[in-house]
Amino acid sequence: MLVLVRGMLLVSLFITSYAIAQKRVFNIYHDSDYSNHSESANAMKMGFLTALSQYENELNNIEFNFIEKDHRGNSNRSLLHMKQFLSDPNALFILGGLHSPPYIRYKQFISENEVLLLVPWAAGGPITRHAAPKNWVFRVSVDDTKAGYRIVSFARDQLRCEQPHMLLEQTPWGKSNHTTMRKALGNVNEGAVTWFSWNTKLNQAKIMLRDITATGAQCVLFVGNAVEGKQFVDAMAALPSEQRVPIVSHWGITGGDFFNQVKQHLANDVKLNFIQTCLAIEPENQSPLAKQASVTATKLFPNTFTGLENLSAPAGFVHSFDLANIFLTAFANVKPKGNISDIRLSLRNELERIKKPIEGLIKTYQHPFSQWSPTQPDAHEALGLENLCMAEYKANGGIRVFNNKEH
C-alpha cells in the first residue's frame, strides 16, 4: 500500500526468501530537478513507485522510503545529496535524475565512495563508464554513445539534411554528444558546431540561429533541455520562413513544460523531431503490461497521472518502471540485514548477475547488466541503439514515437 508520510512516499514490500524478525527500512534517494524540470522528475517518481506497488502482495517486512532530493539543476547540490546518502545508515541507492553533468563531474566520487546510482534519464556517455575501483552506476535510458548515431541518421535519411549544424549545451553532456555526433557525421561538416550556455535568452538564441543559417546549414542537431529549447524554438520561429530549418533534438526538451510553451510554433512555424526510446505510447498500441501500469498509476496518482499518452515526459515513467523491476529482481537475492555498505555491495553484484527474463515496458530484459570492464563499456547499459527511435509531438502534446522502419 502506498502511503504519504511526512512528504515522503512510502511503499511496503516483502521478501519471501528470508524470514525477517523485524521490519527493515531502506531509503531510496531521488536526486532530480524538481524545480525547473518537474515534469521529468515526477514522471520518474511515478514510474518507479508504480512498479514497486505491484510487488506489495509478494514481499513483506521491508519498508522503502522514496525521498525526493531536489538538486535544482545544480551539480554541487547533487554532490551534497550523495554525501547525505553516504551518512544515512538506511540509504540503499540513489535514483538519478534528468541532468548528466553532476554524474559525469562526480563519477570518481561515486566510484570511490561506492554510491550505488541507478539512472533512468541522464544520458551522458561517461556516466556508466568508470574503471576504478568498481563501477557503481547502472542505466536504463538513452546512452549518448549511441544517441548521436540515431539523431544523425534521421536527419540525413529522413530529412535529407546534407549540411547539419550541431547546437550543443556547453556542459559535459553536450560534449559527450559532440563526440558521438562527430563520429556519426564522419568527415562531412564535422566542425559545424555552436555552443550555448544554460539560461541562454531569446536575443542570444536569435543571433546564434541567424549565424547558423547563414552558413547554409539545412538542419540543426540540438542538445539541450526544455528551458533553453524553448528559447531556440522561439528564435527559429522568429526567422523569415525561407531561413527556417528543421530541428532534430535530443530528448532533454521533453523534461519540462516545453510543449505548452512552444505548441503554437510547432503547429505553424517550426519542424521538430526528437529522440526517444522505442515504445508504443498510444493507448491502442500499448502492451498489456503498459495498460496495467497505467491503471495502477492512475489509482496511485489520481491528481497527476491521466494516462501514459498524456505525460509530457513519458520516458521518465517508462525507464523508472523498468529500472524498478530490474532492481526488485536483483534485490530478491540480497540478504536485507547487516551493514548497509554490505547490502549495497550485494545489490550491486546481483544487478550484474541477473539471468531471469524481466518483462518491461520497453522490452524483455534477458540479461540487463553484466560485469563492467574497459573492454566491455556497455556492460551497465540495459538499452542499445536498437532501442532508440525518433518521435514528434502530437497536437495535444502527446508524443508519437516512430518505429525504426517508419518515418
Image: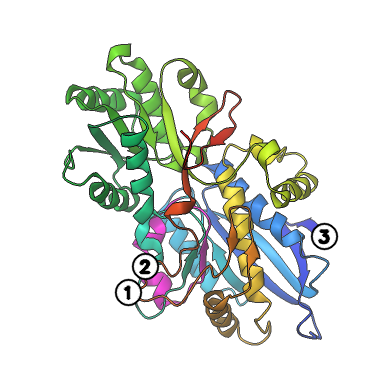
Nearer to us: label 3 or label 2:
2
Kind of residue at disc 2 = Arg
Q: Is residue 230 left or right of residue 105?
A: right
Is residue 102 visible to us here?
yes
**Relative to residue 261, is residue 73 depicted above or below?**
below
**Relative to residue 14, is residue 43 depicted above or below?**
above
Residue 328, percent from left and from top = 66, 69
The residue singled out by tag 1 in the image is: 375
Return the disc, 3 or 2, that comes first in the chain's sequence.
3
Q: CA distance from mark 1 to mark 2?
A: 11 Å
The residue singled out by tag 2 in the image is: 129
Residue 46, percent from left and from top = 67, 50
Which residue appears at 34% of the width and 48% of the height?
149
Judge whether residue 109 is colored magenta: yes
Kind of residue at disc 3 = Met
Kind of residue at disc 1 = Thr
Return the disc, 1 or 2, that comes first in the chain's sequence.
2
Q: Closer to the camera, 35 or 235? A: 235
The residue singled out by tag 3 in the image is: 1
Residue 207, percent from left and from top = 24, 24
Q: Within the image, what quadrant is residue 3 found in? A: bottom right
Q: If the image is split into quadrants, where does the N terminus sit?
A: bottom right
User: Helix or strand or loop: what does disc 3 sit on?
Assistant: loop
Nearer to us: label 1 or label 2:
1
Span shown in magenta: 99-122
Q: Is residue 393 left or right of residue 228?
A: right
Which residue appears at 80% of the width and 82% of the height?
22
User: Helix or strand or loop: what does disc 1 sit on?
Assistant: loop
